[in-house]
Image (spheres, rainbow, N blue to C red):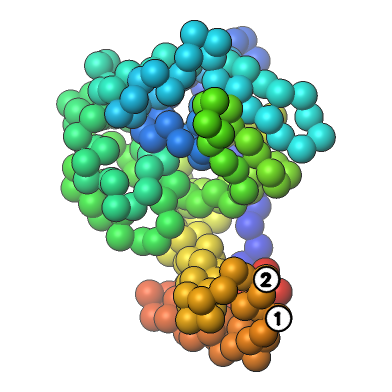
Amino acid sequence: PAPAYGPPAPHPRHDGRGVVTTVAVLGPGAIGGLLAVRLGQAGHDVTLIGRHPSDVTVGGLTLTAPGADAVTTRPASRPYLTQPVEFLIVAVKAPQLVDATARVPAAFMAGATVVPFLNGVDHLPYLRAVYPADIVAGTIVVEATKLPDGTIGQASMSPAITLAVPSGSGAAAAAAGLLDVPGLRVTTHPDETQVLWQKLCMLATFALLTTTAELPVGAAREKFADWVGPLASEACATAAVPGATVDPEAVEAQI
C-alpha cells in the first residue's frame, strides 16, 4: 500500500495578523477559477492570467459548491503577468503549457514558488527549466465545470489537494500552508514521484478502460468489469519503475 499522507505543514506567512500573499493563477478555467476564489476568500491578493481577461466580469468570479453558499471574489484578470508574485499556480491543460508559460515572464518568478496542478509527470522538468523558482509537485481531485456565465460549478465535495513536501523544503511547506484554506482539503507527502503517480495510475486505468470500451466509465465498468483489475495492475507496475508504490486494489476501488 502507498505510504500514508499527512496534514500540511504550517504556512510561515500566516501568523494571524492578516499578512496578504500575492498569488497568480495561470489558467482561468474550472480548476484555476475554483482555486482563485478560495484563495481570494481567504484574503490573498489573486490575479488570474489567461487569454481572455474578460473571463472575470465586473461582478467578480462566483463559485458554487455542494452544501455551501455561493462565494464571489474579485480577482484581477490579465493576459500577462506584469509584476512579481510570491506564488504561481499553474492550472492549464498539459498541451497548453508551453504557450501559457509565455504569459508569465521568468524574470518575475525569481524567488517565487510555482505549484502546477497538471496530470502526468512531464511538466515538472519543463517548468524547472523555464522558471528560476521552487517548483512544488501537486495534484488536485475535484469535479468542477466552468459554466457559460463564468460561474465555477463544483459538483463534488471539498477538492482533495496533495502536495509533495520533502523534509526541509520551506517553499513546499509554505505552498501547503497557502492552500490550506476553507473549502480546500490539503495533505502532504515527502515524495513527488509518489504524489504524481498516485493520481496518474487512476487516470491511466480510467482512460484505458473508457477509450478501449468506447463507453463512459459507468457503462464500461459494468460491461467490462474484468478489465479493471488488470489495467490497474499494469498502471501500478509502470509506476513502480520510477519508484512509486501504488496499490492496484485501491485504484480498482476508485474506478
Which disc, if any, is residue 218?
2
Relative to 116, 221 lies left or right: right
Q: Amino acid at mark 2?
A: Gly
Which disc, if any, is residue 108?
none
Residue shown at the point (27%, 16%) measured from the top left? 83
Q: Nearer the viewer, residue 74 or 133?
A: 74
Residue shown at the point (42%, 41%) measured from the top left? 91
Disc 1 is placed on an element classified as helix
Query: Image quarter for residue 185?
Result: top right
Relative to 56, 5 lies left or right: right
Q: Nearer the viewer, residue 132 or 214?
A: 214
Q: Quadrant of the C terminus?
A: bottom right
Relative to 32, 121 lies left or right: left
Label 2–label 1 contact, CB within 8 A? yes
* Residue 176 percent across, percent down from the top left: 54, 39
Residue shown at the point (36%, 33%) measured from the top left? 26
Disc 2 is placed on an element classified as helix
Query: Image quarter for residue 106?
Result: top left
Crowding at dot 1, Cα within 10 Å, few <14 / some 14-19 / many 20+, comes out as: few
Q: Is any part of residue 169 visible from this angle?
A: no
44 w.r.t. 153: above or below: above
* Residue 202 percent across, percent down from the top left: 55, 69
Q: Quadrant of the N terminus?
A: bottom right
Q: Marks 2 and 1, how far apart in space?
A: 6 Å
Residue shown at the point (51%, 67%) measured from the top left? 203
* Residue 184 percent across, percent down from the top left: 65, 37
* Residue 57 percent across, percent down from the top left: 48, 14
Residue denoted by label 1:
222
Q: Amino acid at mark 1?
A: Glu
Give the tally of numbered discs: 2
Q: Nearer the viewer, residue 58 or 100?
A: 58
Crowding at dot 2, Cα within 10 Å, few <14 / some 14-19 / many 20+, comes out as: few
